[in-house]
Image: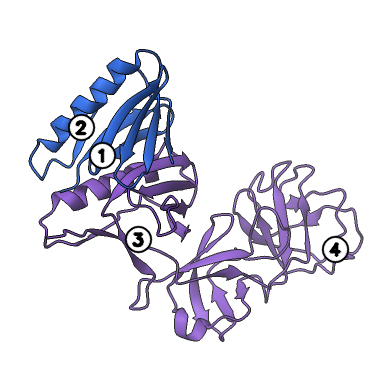
Chain colours: A blue, B purple
């Protein structure tokens, strides 16, 4: 069952972010929330200020998405702070 | 149970760079005069341009023919089109030998087995024509003069051929385990998988497409198809990617 967050990224539309296989979501610094997957792949969300607030929001949204029925594949997120970039590594 | 899902991506059946035809003459219009191509630096006579040759306005996509064979260089070239401002100052143009204008000549190609009349040809400048006849393994006749080796810019010799026949370029694209789909720019998106390669590298695929003229249209279509595919029954393993109107995928790397 695949689940995604649909997150608006500045000048790049809504970007799907997988909720599957996540092992951690960390507020790395004041401008970054890093999602790490089991494989080691990371997705770094660049945002502004209040890292814990953003990290907590992403965590909550992931949990809510995973708790929905299987036909609810994508969950639209309205970030508390704008996300300006998404980097995969 | 592992639930696999795929999208179908319509890819070209043949891609390449044409070795011919080429232009007799090409340049940029330096002025306007209805019924004429004005280029004060052109050498139409010396280039062997004659009445009946095909004149392509590269900028607008308009096509006409040479009305009168030029006898001296430097004069305006009479064209058959009487459309006001068929050429605007700054428009790029090329002039093709009439017999060659609608050809596409490949090298090392197998057009007879790979291509059929009605297939769509896209050039590197994102202009389209259809295949009228398959002349040989290396030559096609097209419905419009979109292929030329000169000028080199904009690109009119790179070509992509799309077929809707049994030998179409439809390719399964695995969407299981996608981490994210990134809008990188107007001409491509990057799909990143959660699982890495055997060597531990990031597992990315870049999907190149014709220019997205409205914001993130292709990216949105891909996102929607991905979500829709997972909303279907597990037996529905394959979902068509519905491309935005007029858009095509050129290559996946």
Label 4 sits on residue? B70
| Image height of B16 relative to B196, above or below | below
Local packing at callout 2 (Cα closer than 10 Å; few below 14, some 14-19, many 20+) is many
Query: Residues under labels 1 and 4: Cα distance?
Result: 71 Å
Residue A25, position as x, y percentages in the image: 29, 30
- Residue A22 has which mark? 1
| Image height of A30 relative to B39, above or below | above
Query: Residues under labels 2 and 4: Cα distance?
Result: 71 Å
Q: Which element type, helix, strand or loop, lies under badge 1? A: strand
Q: Are marks 2 and 4 on the same chain?
A: no
Look at the image and tell me whether residue A79 can be seen: no
Q: Quadrant of residue B4?
A: bottom left
Label 3 sits on residue? B9
Q: Which element type, helix, strand or loop, lies under badge 3? A: strand
Name the subunit of mark 1: A
* Chain-order first, disc 1 or disc 2: 1
**Tag nearer the camera, 3 or 1:** 1
Q: Are marks 4 and 3 on the same chain?
A: yes
* Residue situated in front as seen by the camera: B59 or B3: B3
Name the subunit of mark 3: B
């Amino acid at each position: 069952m695949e689940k995604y967050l649909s997150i608006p990224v500045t000048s790049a539309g809504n970007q799907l972010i997988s909720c599957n296989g996540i092992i951690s979501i960390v507020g790395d610094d004041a401008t970054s929330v890093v999602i790490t997957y089991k494989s080691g792949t990371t997705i770094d969300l660049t945002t502004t200020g209040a890292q814990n607030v953003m990290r907590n929001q992403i965590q909550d949204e992931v949990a809510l998405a995973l708790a929905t029925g299987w036909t609810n594949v994508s969950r639209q997120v309205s970030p508390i702070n704008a996300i300006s970039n998404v980097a995969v590594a | 149970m592992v639930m696999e899902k795929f999208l179908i991506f319509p890819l070209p059946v043949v891609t390449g760079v044409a070795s011919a035809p080429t232009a007799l003459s090409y340049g940029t219009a330096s002025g306007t005069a209805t019924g004429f191509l004005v280029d004060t630096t052109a050498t139409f006579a010396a280039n062997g341009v004659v009445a009946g040759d095909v004149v392509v306005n590269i900028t607008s996509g308009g096509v006409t023919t040479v009305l009168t064979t030029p006898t001296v260089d430097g004069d305006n070239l009479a064209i058959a089109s009487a459309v006001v401002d068929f050429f605007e100052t700054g428009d790029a143009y090329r002039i093709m030998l009439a017999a060659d204008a609608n050809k596409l000549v490949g090298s090392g190609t197998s057009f007879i087995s790979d291509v059929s009349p009605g297939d769509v040809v896209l050039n590197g400048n994102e202009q389209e024509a259809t295949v009228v006849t398959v002349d040989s393994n290396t030559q096609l006749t097209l419905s419009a003069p979109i292929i030329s080796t000169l000028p080199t810019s904009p690109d009119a010799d790179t070509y992509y051929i799309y077929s809707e026949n049994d030998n179409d370029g439809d390719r399964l694209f695995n969407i299981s385990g996608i981490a994210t789909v990134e809008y990188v720019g107007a001409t491509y998106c990057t799909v990143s998988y959660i699982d890495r390669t055997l060597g531990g590298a990031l597992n990315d695929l870049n999907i190149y497409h014709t220019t997205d003229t409205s914001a993130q249209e292709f990216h949105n279509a891909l996102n929607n198809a991905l979500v829709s595919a997972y909303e279907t029954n597990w037996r529905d393993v394959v979902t068509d990617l519905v491309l935005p109107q007029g858009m095509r995928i050129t290559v996946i790397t």
